[in-house]
Structure formats: C-alpha cells, structure tokens
Amino acid sequence: MSDAALERFRTLLRHATFSHDGAEGVDEAFDGFHADLARLFPLVHERLERELVAGRSLLYRWAGDDPTRAAVLLAHQDVVAVDDDSRWTHPPFAAELDGDGEERTIWGRGALDDKAALVSTLEAVEARLAAGFTPRGDVYLAFGHDEEAGGTGAEAIVEQLAARGVEPWLVIDEGGAVMDGLLPGLGPTAVVGLTEKGIMNVELVVEQAGGHAAIPLSGGSTAVLARAILRLENQPEPPHLIEPTIGLLEALGARMGGIRGWALRHARMLRGPLAKTLASSSPQLAAMTRTTRAVTQLRGSSSKNVVPERASATLNVRILPGATVETALADIARTIDDPAVQLRVLDGADPAPVSPAEGPAWEAISASIREVFPEAAVAPYVMLQASDARHFSRISRAVYRFLPFDLRQEELQSIHGVDERIRVSTYLRAIAFFDALVGRL
C-alpha cells in the first residue's frame, strides 16, 4: 500500500499548479491535477459529492450519520513560484525519489506546502471508504486553488457553506508541525495554531523636488524615505505575550526542570521578562511577541542620473492578535513621525479569532497527534503566516492549524524555497494522522 500511495503522491506533485500572476500553463496544470485526483481516488469521487467552486477550488461532502454535525479538512492545491530551477538538486516538478530508510525522500515543489496534506487526507478518506466507514457527521474536504495568492477560492467555499447553514465543530488546515528541540534539551513538540497573524501591505510614499543627480538637493525623496525605513527598523513594537504563546510556554515548561522550566510554567506571572527574552532569542520567537514590519519593495527613479520626485516602499506587516489593521497603521505612522511620508494601505486583514485549547475539536486533534506521535507533547501556538483557515473563522469557532509532519529545520526552511522535500516516513505518518482524525469525526 505504501509504494502505491507514494506513486499517487508523486503523480500529483508533477502538476505545476501555480497561482501567482503571470504563471503560464495554469489551466492545463489544474485540469490535469483534477483529472488525476479523480483517477487515483475513485471511491472519493464516486461516493462523495464534488463541487467546483470559483473555477478551480474543490469542495467534497462526505455525508455522515448526523447532518447537523460538520467538520472541515482544509488543504490547498496551488504552489508558489520556482524562480530558478537550476538551483534545485532535483527538478522541482519531477517528484524524484531517492535515499534509503529514514532518509528516503520525495523532492518537489508542493511536497510540504501543501500537497502532502491534501493527498494524505485523500488517502485516509479513500481507505476509510474502502473499509465501509461512515463518519458520525458530515465531513467536508475543502481544497482552495489560490491560497498563495490571497485565498479567494477558500473565501468562495466559506460563502457556499455559510449559505447552507453549515457551522463546523472542527476545522483544520496547514500550520504548526512536530518540531524537535524547540528549546535545547526538549523533546518533540506538536504545535497547533489557535490563531494566525493578520496581514497588511502598506505603501510608504514620499514626493519631493527631484532633478539631476549632478546637483542633488538635501532632503530628497529617497533620503526622507530611508529615514522612515530606519525608524521602523530601529523601533520595533515592544514585545508582549498573548494567550496562545503563554499556553505554548507553559506546555514546554511542563517538560523541563530547573529554573528555566519553573519560569516557563509561570509564564503568565512572568510575561513581561519572558516576552523580552523571546524577542531577543531569535527572529522566529521575536515574531511571536509583536506585530512585525518588513520592507519588501523599493521604487525610485527609472534613470541612474535622476533624483526621483517620488520614492516609495512596500511594507509587509504581520499583525499580532489583539491588534488590528487600524491600530497597526497608527503605530507605523507614530513611529515614522514625519508628515512628508504618506501611508496608503494596499490590502489588509485583521488577525483571526483565537480558538480554544480545549473542547471536543482540540481533543480530537490532540488525541490523533498522540496516536501517531506518542513521544510528542501537544501545545498551542500563534501561526505567523497567513492561511486559508482564517476565512473559516466566519462559520466556526474551532479553527486549528496543524501539519502532521515531523520536520527537521532544513526541511522547514525549504518551504517556499529551493529543494522543497518530504521524507517518505513523514508522509506516511501524515496519512496515519488523517486516518486517526477521520475516525474521530
């Protein structure tokens, strides 16, 4: 069974289902992907209701014994761009398999983000259908087509479910994973996202007199813009701990001894000092303590010898739960403190609501994790990236973010990067997790 499952996965990885602007051959890629899904998972397509939403997104309904009880398993079909495939050890859409034993690995764009979750979900459902299993409630499989480009497919799926009065008791999407050594000496921890940061893109614009570069004026547009950027860089928001991060630290502390374990177990009481410690430990931990701001694009003159009249920068902002687009924008203006710098919100979404780290949905996910990863502790956390899950908060109060992958640091770093890959053993455990979870739905 495992070899056949790997071949199905590899087949689906070979479709370049891009969602970014300007990608070529997208219609053919999605058509081929959908055709292979139907061919490789015949029982899913024979016994589940299937709808095409927003052109390319897929929504399946698996009818259960109780139609008032619904759960949603999310994943997305699309993948991010490959800027230079010559830098890859294996071609990004060849889905090559190499290595032996625990190092046996499948290479390809989408291997982690997010086709492994999508295909392992289908593997679990197909096997359960073959065994004659019927879930207690309706199970929806929701596979958006443009998560990497904003998630309009997921939004359309939510619209459909809301119109039908569906209020899921559990929603699960990509997010945290099983990580070893989150802190020195600590064993594996499965981190489950209770919420995710909001996202906003802001354009900083400065318009001043320009002219010939041979006769520059002081205080030109680029200088004013540079000062604004440096103020944002040098004055990050003060760090603080929000509830999911406190829960994460308490869970980590429960497995540690000594003064460090004691401090983490008392994170609520020591939230101020611990926030400062996390903020100075690493960029990843710092991002859990504050709204972050990163300049991603700069624009000035189109000529080498012309001082631009207009200089601009794009600021990508990830908003910590508790703040909003409005408050984050006000903080940026207050930090820059220069009326010559205009701020224009290009797009934005507030942080997702925080789901509870208790109750039937949390317990179903936690029990499934413990069944497949018995050595791992389960802990809540704040997802730093945006996902399709945020749209489902409109219809459910129990929205979680977890990928059932035991990941090494270099594998984690391959997401959206070069040489994206997944170990075969990791992928097979993902199938086992979704099988365990489906059995609890």
Image (cartoon, rainbow, N blue to C red):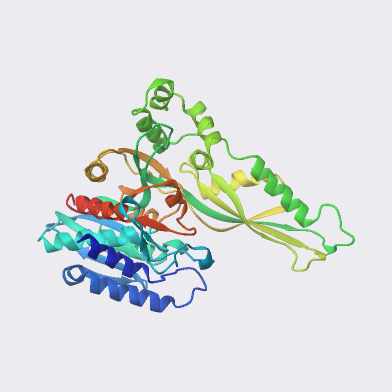
Name the quadrant containing residue 14: bottom left
Q: Is residue 138 above or below residue 234?
A: below
Q: Residue 239, can we see it?
A: no
Q: Position of residue 162 (x, y in %)?
A: 30, 60
Q: Position of residue 316 (x, y in %)?
A: 57, 53
Count of numbered marks: 0
Q: Position of residue 372 (x, y in %)?
A: 24, 45
Name the quadrant containing residue 380: top left
Q: In the image as oriented, which residue stretches furthest toward the right?
A: 215
Q: In the figure, is residue 172 to the left or right of 259?
A: left
Q: In the figure, is residue 6 to the left or right of 88?
A: left
Q: Is residue 361 above or below residue 34?
A: above
Q: Position of residue 215 (x, y in %)?
A: 90, 60
Q: Residue at x 37, y 54 (%)?
A: 389
Q: Residue at x 24, y 74 (%)?
A: 39
Name the quadrant containing residue 164: bottom left
Q: In the figure, is residue 40 to the left or right of 279?
A: left
Q: Residue at x 36, y 72 (%)?
A: 56
